[in-house]
Amino acid sequence: MTNLTSNLNRTVGVLIMRTLLGIIFLMQGYGKVFTWGMEGVYGSFQPYEEKLPVFLVKFAAYYTSFAELTGGLLLVLGLFRNYTLYALGLVLLIVSFGHGLSQPIWDLSHVFPRAVLLIALLLIPQEWDRWHLDGLIRKKGFKA
C-alpha cells in the first residue's frame, strides 16, 4: 500500500469514526429531547432522587440529553472537537454512574461502544482528523 493510500485510509477512517460517534450521540439526544420530551427524560431519572440530591438528578437528566444532542451534531460537523469529546465523555461517566447506582451489574452495551470510539478519538493524533468544519473556519481547508 502506498503512503498516499495509507494516509487517505487513515483520514477516511477517522472521519467515519468521528461521524459515527456523532450520529450515535445525536440520535440518542434527539430521542430524549424530541421523542420522549424532557419531562419524560426527567421522569426516568426521578427514581435516583431516593439516593441523590434532586438538583444533581435534574442536572444529569438535562445535561446528558442536551450534551448528546448538541455534542453529536458538533462531532458530525467537526466543530470544537476536543471540547465536544470532553463534554460527551462526562455524559458517559454520568450514565455509567447512574446505571451502576440502579443496578451494579448492568448491560454495558449502552456505554461501551461509545466509550471506545470516544477514547480512540482522544488518543489518536489530531492531525489525522483532517476533514472537519473547524479546518474550514481556520481557513486551512480540506487536506487529503
Image (tube, rainbow, N blue to C red):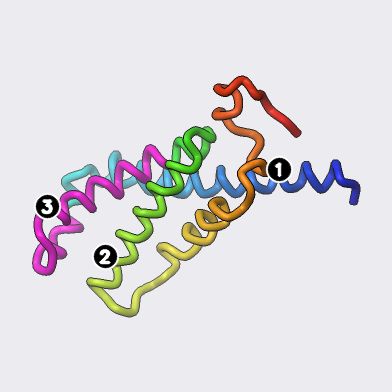
Crowding around mark 1 (Cα neighbors within 10 Å: few <14, some 14 to 19, many 20+) is some
> In the drawing, does residue 39 fall left or right of residue 1?
left
Quadrant position of residue 110 = bottom left
Q: Nearer the viewer, mark 3 or mark 2?
A: 3
Give me the C-alpha separation between circle 3 and circle 2. 15 Å
For image coordinates 35% across by 60% down, the residue present is 93
Residue 10 in the image, given as x and y percentages of width and height? 73, 47
For image coordinates 18% across by 51% down, the residue present is 42
Q: Say which mark, if any, is on residue 11.
A: 1
Q: Residue furthest right?
A: 2
Mark closest to the chain's N terminus, 2 or 1: 1
- The residue type indicated by label 2 comes to Gly
Residue 77 in the image, given as x and y percentages of width and height? 52, 33
Crowding around mark 3 (Cα neighbors within 10 Å: few <14, some 14 to 19, many 20+) is few
Residue 133 in the image, given as x and y percentages of width and height? 56, 28
Q: Please name whichever residue, 91 or 123, is drawn nearer the observer in this view of the structure.
A: 123
> In the drawing, does residue 95 fall left or right of residue 42?
right
Q: Which residue is mark 3?
A: 55
Mark closest to the chain's N terminus, 3 or 2: 3
| Residue 110 lies in the magenta-colored region | no
Q: Say which mark, if any, is on residue 98.
A: 2
For image coordinates 68% across by 28% down, the residue present is 142
Looking at the rendering, the stretch of residues picked out in magenta corresponds to 43-71
| Residue 61 lies in the magenta-colored region | yes
Element under disc 1? helix
